Amino acid sequence: MYFSSAEITCNPLLPLGTAILVSFFTSMGGVSGAFLLLPFQMSVLGYTNPSVSATNQFYNIVACPSGVIRYWREGRLVVPIASSIALGTLPGVFIGAIVRITLLPDPTSFKVFAGFVLLYIGLRMLQSLLKETAAASKRPQGETTLAITCNTASRLAFVFQENEYVVDKRRLILLSLVVGLVGGIYGIGGGAIMSPFLVSFFDLPVYVVAGATLLATAITSFGGVAFYAALSPFFPGISVAPDVLLGCTIGLGGMIGMYLGAKCQKYVSAILIKAMLVLTLIILALRYISTLF
């Protein structure tokens, strides 16, 4: 099948199957899988136009709702966290889109940038993983729904697994702004970066943050795709707008994988989820950074 905007030809089962596999595992950690699907599109499919970032965010729009719905049905979707992330991330995504088009249009430069982003995320998650206690890494036992006890403009508190968690929304929005900038450039919507930050900086359980980060990713990705599309007429010599057909193909795979991943997440150890993501991130990061040498 030929994907016109991406200017590539491939069997659609390849991106579809890859998206199912990737999103099944990454969605357990609150990550859409876009951060892995972008290097897959670039290195395997040969899609290196700037529009790959917009296509990757289009994937998030199609794929994330299935995982969000599953977490919502199980009572593990913290909407105030998702809304705070989206509020801070959106402006950064818009700025990041401009940076991607104007300063990082060259595939080689973009791969190096992507490598350092992936390495930072991986080391951040590794640090969190090493600090975890045995109790924190166990699967949740008993009731897995949560109860919000306080939700104001600056503070959120909720109870999950008999433990109370408090979030400073102002810190969360500020962090989300920076994350949105990087996510806008990289084309991941910011969720892949926010999830480890929420776990390590805010000490929140991965079983709770997953649904919120997926929802925020979907919201910010929608804004990112719209912005890329709006910028397209101003850059006639560059492929900027998303490849809708390819985005729908990998999005369908992500939709299936995320729903199944969200359904299975509560049965999998948090430490196992993070270890898998850390290993994948660091390997990909080193591979991209090696293009410098």
Image (spheres, rainbow, N blue to C red):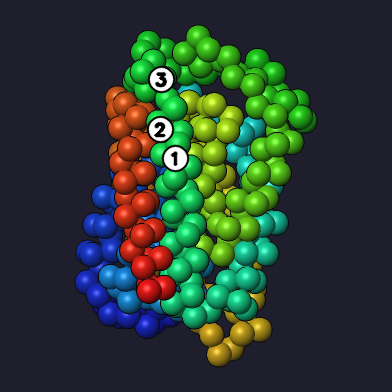
Which residue is tagged 2? 129
Judge left or right: residue 247 versus residue 43. right
| Residue at 54% in and 43% down | 194
Height in image: 270 above or below 112?
above
Question: Nearest the camera: 204 or 126?
Answer: 126
Count of numbered badges drawn on the protein: 3
SS label for mark 3: loop
Check the image and name the residue furthest to the right. 153
Amino acid type, label 1: Met
Q: Residue 25: percent from the left, percent from the top?
A: 31, 42
Q: Does the residue at mark 1 contact the one at mark 2 (Cβ under 8 Å)?
A: yes
Residue 41 appearing in the image: no
SS label for mark 2: helix
Q: Name the quarter where the N terminus is drawn.
A: bottom left
Mark number displayed over residue 125: 1
| Inter-mark Cα distance, 1 to 2 | 6 Å
Q: Residue 185: percent from the left, percent from the top?
A: 56, 64
Q: Does the residue at mark 3 contact the one at mark 2 (Cβ under 8 Å)?
A: no
| Residue at 32% in and 55% down | 283
Is the residue marked by circle 1 packed among few (<14), some (14-19), or many (20+) residues within 10 Å?
many
| Inter-mark Cα distance, 3 to 2 | 9 Å
Which residue is tagged 3? 133
Judge left or right: residue 102 versus residue 36. right
